Image (cartoon, coloured by chain):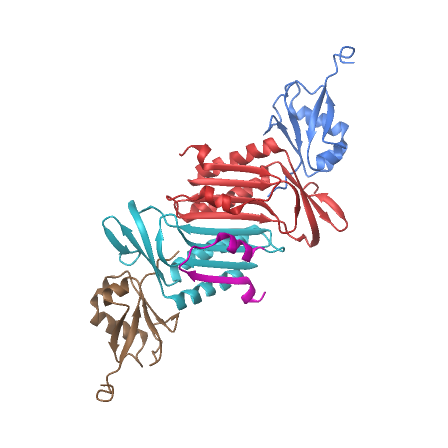
Chain colours: A red, B blue, C cyan, D brown
């Protein structure tokens, strides 16, 4: 397995995320399949119009958990490289909240690995979304 | 104050997301946490802040990693309440 | 279902493909999940070093078949938009041969639809790769 | 020539990929194709160009769409040999 420092790129930042930077990081002459997931802010959630969102993050642990996921996905699906960039702070409708980028020799593991990472990220990475609607705000997933 | 009351130690517990609203700020204080298990910390937290019981659940992190209920908390640990995450 | 002319973007061109253009086409305020597949030219195929590739295409039918796939995927997986761009002509190692970009309200149909499109494209769209190695060239998949 | 031999019609069949190599160019000519089924075209093609039998298979397109074996070819149709595709 390749050196983790060159095949994993994790970031948590309060500036817009860059799909091309993720593409450049994961692309490689040995790879034929690159898969990207881009999560964006929707204007409607569970039927309610959303005006904007605020992302809170436990920075140090969030980055560590993202690194764990990226390495686990690389090893489990035999990926060449993984870039995992997450936004924090205030986001508007249409803004990019997260980018998952993976590369592999063939395409099937790229799709599988990319979807696995975003599914797991939503379960374990300590980042929280506060949703603002016309009638107030609340932290998503917090209460039953 | 520290010298006059050496037997009661307060530990600062960091809070994020909805936990900050329940705590009324970015952290809360719990007494005599060091040496207790995570499970005991949960009990103490729910006694002092019953509103945490209204959440879907919460995890506890120790030094930037999820802690299991039987882990024992050290005096210099960074302890954090992790309400249900909603990133991505 | 939305007007096909605004939610489907198909292209077959002999110039480099543009991931950002595909992103801009599919992104929409109603969508939370965007999935992209980027197929690139590998330096090794079935164990043999590849120097470059030539893509031949039956242009008119290729575009029609790509349009059919994009519309079928949109309707089958409930996608908001699909961009499907394919390269033709001479390609070097690392060049992008194909981009599939899809958007949907939630992420699962985006992954499913994106993978379905590239799987089907490889079965039905009349485009042919000629692979060049140090010791000669051959059309891929042509012979048993 | 057309007026002297009106009963033998030649149709130009377009070729791509490996089919171009077998045909020795971007198209080939077959006699009396109009009015025949795609299945009959296949038989005529294999008789005149046996090398097509060495392929994994091939499809026939009529007017930019895949044709089924029982479709009948019209005089003005664009007919194309589609060897196994390998795009993507």
Quarter occupied by residue A119: top right
Q: Which residues are magenta?
A: C1-27
Q: Is residue C119 visible?
A: yes
Count up the numbered dots: 0
- In the picture as drawn, the residue positioned furthest to the bottom comes out as D3
Q: Is residue C138 above or below residue B46?
A: below
Q: Nearer the viewer, residue C61 or A126?
A: C61
| Placement of A20 over or under D10, stated as above or below | above
**Residue D14 percent coordinates (x, y):** 31, 70
User: Does the magenta segment cover residue B72?
Assistant: no
Res. C1 in view: no
Splitting the image into 4 quarters, where does residue A79 fall? Answer: top left
| Vertical order, C61 against A79 (above or below) | below
> Is residue D2 rendered to the left or right of residue D75?
left
The answer to whether residue A83 is left or right of residue D11 is: right
Q: Does the magenta segment cover residue C7?
A: yes
Judge by depth and name the residue closer to the eye, C55 or C64.
C55
Residue drawn at point x = 52 percent, y = 59 percent: C82
Image quadrant where one finds the N terminus of chain B = top right
Q: Position of residue A110 (x, y in %)?
A: 45, 46
For the point 25% across and 76% down, the residue is: D30
Residue at the extreme top of the image, as rendered: B3
- Expressed as whole percent of the image width and height from the top left, the position of residue C42 reads 36, 47
Which residue is at the far front? C15
Q: Is residue C86 left or right of residue C80?
A: left
Q: Position of residue D63 (x, y in %)?
A: 38, 74
Q: Nearer the viewer, residue D70 or D49?
A: D49
Residue D67 lies in what quarter of the image?
bottom left
Question: The C terminus of chain B appears in which quarter of the rendering?
Answer: top right
């Amino acid at each position: 397995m390749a050196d983790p420092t060159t095949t994993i790129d994790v970031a948590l930042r309060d500036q817009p995320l860059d799909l091309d930077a993720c593409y450049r990081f994961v692309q490689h002459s040995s790879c034929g399949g690159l898969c990207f997931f881009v999560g964006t802010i929707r204007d409607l959630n569970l039927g309610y119009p959303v005006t904007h969102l605020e992302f809170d993050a436990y920075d140090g642990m969030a980055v560590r958990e993202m690194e764990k996921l990226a390495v686990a996905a690389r090893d489990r699906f035999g990926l060449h490289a993984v870039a995992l960039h997450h936004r924090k702070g205030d986001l508007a409708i249409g803004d990019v909240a997260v980018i998952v980028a993976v590369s592999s020799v063939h395409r099937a593991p790229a799709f599988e690995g990319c979807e696995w990472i975003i599914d797991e990220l939503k379960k374990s990475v300590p980042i929280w979304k506060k949703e603002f609607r016309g009638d107030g705000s609340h932290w998503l997933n917090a209460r039953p | 104050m520290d010298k006059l009351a050496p037997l009661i130690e307060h530990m600062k517990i960091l809070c994020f997301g909805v936990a900050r609203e329940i705590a009324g700020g970015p952290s809360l204080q719990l007494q005599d946490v060091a040496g207790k298990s995570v499970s005991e910390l949960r009990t103490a937290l729910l006694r002092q802040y019953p509103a945490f019981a209204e959440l879907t659940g919460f995890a506890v992190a120790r030094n930037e990693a999820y802690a299991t209920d039987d882990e024992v908390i050290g005096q210099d640990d960074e302890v954090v309440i992790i309400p249900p995450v909603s990133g991505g």
